Amino acid sequence: MRYIVMAFDGADPDAPERRRQARPAHMSRAAKLHEDGVLLHGGAILDDAGAMIGSAVIFEVESRAALDTLIAEDPYATGDVWRNIDIRPFKQGF
């Protein structure tokens, strides 16, 4: 099943630094998930000034429970970067 995940960072003043600290581990893990065919598309959500304020990702996983585990183990989750996560089933049109 495919899911789209919109994960927004905290809006507090320390949020950009938490993202900066967790980013190398997050990107390494994302690259492996992409290589494994689990992470299909992903990237940063930007504010109007171009600063990263969240992540948008499309996953293909066996179940919602498997996705919940993947997200819970992500360095942006364990590093308190993501504060608001919206997960929806996703059906690709083209």
Image: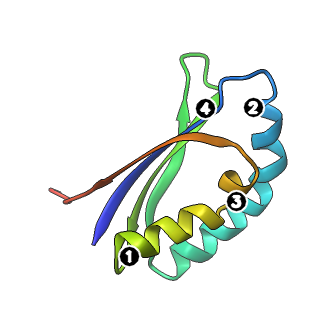
Residue at horizontal 65%, vertical 62%? 74
**Sequence-wise first label, 2 or 4:** 2
Q: Quadrant of residue 80?
A: top right
Q: Residue furthest top?
A: 49
**Sequence-wise first label, 3 or 1:** 3
The residue type indicated by label 1 comes to Val
> In front: mark 3 or mark 1?
1
The residue type indicated by label 4 comes to Ile
> In front: mark 3 or mark 2?
2
Left or right for 10, reference 54: right
Task: Give the class, few, some or many, for how many residues have Cα within 10 Å of label 4's Cα (few <14, many ≥20).
Answer: some
Disc 4 is placed on an element classified as strand
Q: Mark 4 points at which residue?
A: 53
47 to 9, vertically: above or below: above
Q: Name the residue under label 3.
A: 26
82 to 39, vertically: above or below: above
Q: Which residue lies furthest to the left in this view?
A: 93
Label 3, label 2: how many angstroms apart (C-alpha)? Answer: 15 Å
**Sequence-wise first label, 3 or 2:** 2
Disc 1 is placed on an element classified as loop
**Sequence-wise first label, 1 or 2:** 2
**Sequence-wise first label, 1 or 4:** 4
**Sequence-wise first label, 3 or 4:** 3
Residue at horizontal 20%, vertical 59%? 92
Please state, as top left, top right, bottom left or bottom right, where the N terminus lies in the image.
bottom left
**Residue 15 appears at what percent x and percent y?**
75, 31
What is the number of the mark on residue 15? 2
Please state, as top left, top right, bottom left or bottom right, where the C terminus lies in the image.
bottom left
Label 3, label 1: how many angstroms apart (C-alpha)? Answer: 18 Å
